[in-house]
Image (tube, rainbow, N blue to C red):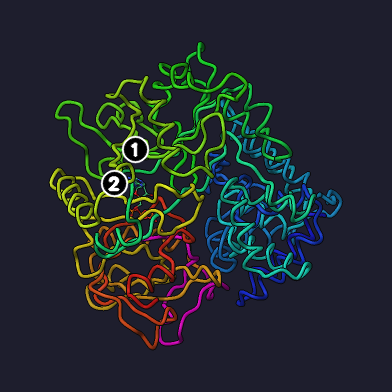
Amino acid sequence: MYLSELSEYFKQLESISSRLTLRDILIELIEKLDEKEAQVVSYFLQGRLVPPFINLEFNIAEKMINRYITERFDITSSKELADLRLKYKDLPGVYEFLATQKRPNASLQNMTILDTYNALTEIALTEGAGSITKKLSLLDSLLRKIDPTSGKYILRLIQGRLRLGVSVRSMLDALAYKESRQNGTDIKVIKAVFDKAYGLTSDIGYITSVYKAKGFEAIKQVKFRAGIPIAPQLAEREKTLKKCLERIPFPLVDPKMDGLRGQIHIFDRYYFEQHTFEDRVWAKIYTHLLNTRENTLLSSSTRFFVKIFSRNLEDLTPMFPEITEWVNKYGEIFFRKIEKDKPLVAVLDSELIGYNENTGEFFGFQVTMTRRRKYGIKEAMQDVPIRAFVFDMMVYGDELIDHPLKERRKIAEEVFADLPSESTVILNTAHKFYENKKAHQKILEEVQAIFYDYVSRGVEGIMIKDPDAPYEPGVRKFSWIKFKRAMKKELADTLDVVVLGYYYGKGRLATLGIGGLLAGVYDQDNDTFVTIAKIGTGFSDNDWLQIKKILDDLAVEKKPARVEVAKELVPDVWVYPKLVIEVSADEITKSPIHTAKVALRFPRFERIREDKTPDEATTLKEVYELANLT
Ligand code: ATP
């Protein structure tokens, strides 16, 4: 397909306001693409060039694009550019207008989607001295070949602002719907197969292309690959320990550390190079990044690569060099228990938490979060060294995902028995109530005692897990139940809500230009955002300013297609659903106005959740569970 045709689809996606139309457009588009194009387009639709676990940035600042436009179109006054910007909303919009006016038709070519992908890859991978000039000259030659509207979208993609309202969920739903229409099987069954495949690969482009190339049966065969994250399993909540134990009478109980989720992959680099890439269009990009950036952390004597992925599948590897150091030191011992003919590949699920080596105490969540940074890593590592508390092992030579937790735990214990117990990567404590089964009342008393003991030592709470359950990527269910200190408040837990718009505010806040947020939760069944609260308390002036800055960058002219809001709540400024914030509230009550059909009573802002994407915010189903409405 040519880029110009794809741009027409982008235009349609931008203008629609119904979720069902969105799905139909996606299905029609997918039908027209071949397998490789489908892969590329799946990333483009998310406003990206690669899946989330690859850290690729274009590094072309807004002011460079500004300069490019002024020079190319001979704009002499900054007022002229400012006026155009006001009229056409953003720089790419200005570009489209100017290029339409002044375009020399002669050089236009029919660029295909794949050619465009290659050109963009080259721009992104240009690094080092003089790279800005080179990037701009590559960009210039690309833009001169494509029509002005395509140019606008390409510029938005480069700026990370191609917001077409399509999530990974929208794509998975469209694929499932298409398949269900074709083969007549229940949509729920088909969705579960696509969800599982996505959970194992975290790569929507790959899923779409496998489906295009080999059909639905092949989706059932999709496998995990070293160096590509598995979607983390999630936990449910329960109000009392008694209820937790009614669900899981003989559990495994873990302390729940309050840090940062870290999925650690350790793998033999030769095996990786041969097995991971298959037909991925981003293979070149991944290898380049691995060889140039992260290799510097590995000692030349080790055969292993390390990768650390966050809760939302981002690559955190460069932020935690101490884990790479640990693998440099202990990699060989770590793999000693793998049988001879098996690949040296392991995946660990862990919580990364700041640890004060002088006092032996853990740092709080906010302090640990300071390690999530791009610069000043060496200093941060000295101030806040981290430890990884391993609580699960999904791969060790073999894939262990379908094995029961108690077996995964046993293997992990055997592996860690050979390793130092005071080190950067250590095994989390586990209390096993499945080994010698006692009377229920006795177990309840013991779990209570464990909970109070941890809480009194500053630990956030405990995790109660079903020892017979497999690891279920990306799934939230009662095989893991979190029980925290905070659960003793009126409402069992805080909620992570998505900001859908803001109000200007009255009185003092009017001077800040923002005084209230319209917040929603994710309705997973319909792939929409429904509203649940207007939030105006809990913010400092600084919070308001910071949030306004983020939201102004996300502002859109009209209600996005996947957002459902009642007339009475229409905000002064709509925003693209992206920012996730954590809020607490007294209770959840029924609401005639909010599209969630429930509302938060006395909602208070707690903090911004940078580590969550909008689809990972609290779901409507969870809200109903918290409110006891299910
Ligand atoms: P969620 O991840 O469930 O959407 P959240 O991000 O608000 O919610 P919490 O409610 O605090 O997080 O609880 C889940 C998180 O607890 C996990 O994602 C993981 O990072 C962390 N965690 C800490 N210790 C453990 C453990 N032993 N087992 C599983 N998860 C743990």
Q: Is residue 314 left or right of residue 48?
A: left
Q: Are marks 2 and 1 in contact (CB under 8 Å)?
A: no
Q: Is residue 279 above or below residue 87?
A: above
Q: Which residues are magenta?
A: 556-581
Q: Observer-nearest residue: 550 or 580? A: 580
- Would you name the residue on which mark 1 appears? 352
At 63% from the left and 32% from the top, the residue drawn is 126
The amino acid type of the residue labelled 2 equals Lys
Q: Is residue 276 left or right of residue 115?
A: left
The location of residue 242, given as percent across then percent down, is 25, 62
- Would you name the residue on which mark 2 appears? 256
Callout 2: CB less than 8 Å from ligand 1:
yes
The location of residue 297, given as percent across then percent down, is 46, 21
The location of residue 226, given as percent across then percent down, is 58, 33
Secondary structure state at the residue bearing disc 2 = strand
At 55% from the left and 29% from the top, the residue drawn is 397
Name the N-terminal-most of marks 2 and 1: 2
Q: Observer-nearest residue: 206 or 107? A: 206
Q: Is residue 420 above or below residue 593?
A: above
State which quarter of the image contains the N terminus.
bottom right
